[in-house]
């Protein structure tokens, strides 16, 4: 999906009030979360490289929240590729 902020998906499908935006920046895929109940989240937190997400994930135990589930690289790549196909841009993923 796409809106004025960019490409996004719902990281928690049951909660449509949270969106995960994605973009390609050079060879990196970046993520940025938006939450309808906390608009300041968008302003306070910038774009995050997927490498940083993976580093953060290593700090969580197996029974706690796994950032890689919310920051989904496969979905991000698919959105970026499909958008590139629609717009005629060639994106190197």
Image (cartoon, rainbow, N blue to C red):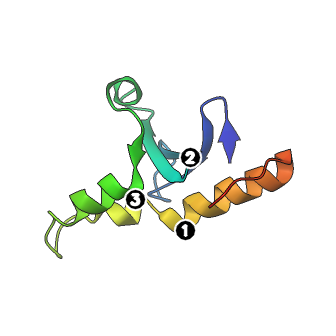
Could you tell me residue 55's position as x and y percent?
24, 60
Q: Toward which corner of the image does residue 77 lie, by quadrant?
A: bottom right
Could you tell me residue 88's position as x and y percent?
86, 48
- To which residue does mark 2 refer? 26
Q: Residue at x 67, y 35 (%)?
A: 3
User: Is disc 1 placed on a helix, strand or loop?
Assistant: helix
- Image mark count: 3
Earlier sequence position, callout 2 versus callout 1: 2
Q: Residues within 10 Å of mark 3 (few under 14, many from 20)?
A: some
Mark closer to the observer (2, 1) = 2
Could you tell me residue 78's position as x and y percent?
65, 63
Relative to 70, 67 lies left or right: left
- To which residue does mark 1 refer? 74
Earlier sequence position, callout 2 versus callout 3: 2
Mark closer to the observer (2, 3) = 2
| Disc ID at residue 70 | 3
């Amino acid at each position: 999906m796409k809106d004025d902020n960019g490409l996004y998906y719902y990281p928690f499908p049951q909660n449509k009030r949270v969106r995960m935006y994605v973009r390609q920046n050079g060879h990196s895929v970046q993520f940025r979360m938006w939450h309808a109940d906390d608009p300041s989240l968008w302003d306070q937190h910038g774009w995050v490289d997927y490498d940083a997400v993976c580093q953060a994930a290593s700090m969580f135990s197996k029974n706690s929240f796994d950032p890689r589930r919310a920051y989904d690289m496969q979905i991000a790549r698919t959105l970026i590729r499909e958008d590139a196909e629609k717009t005629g841009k060639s994106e190197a993923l």
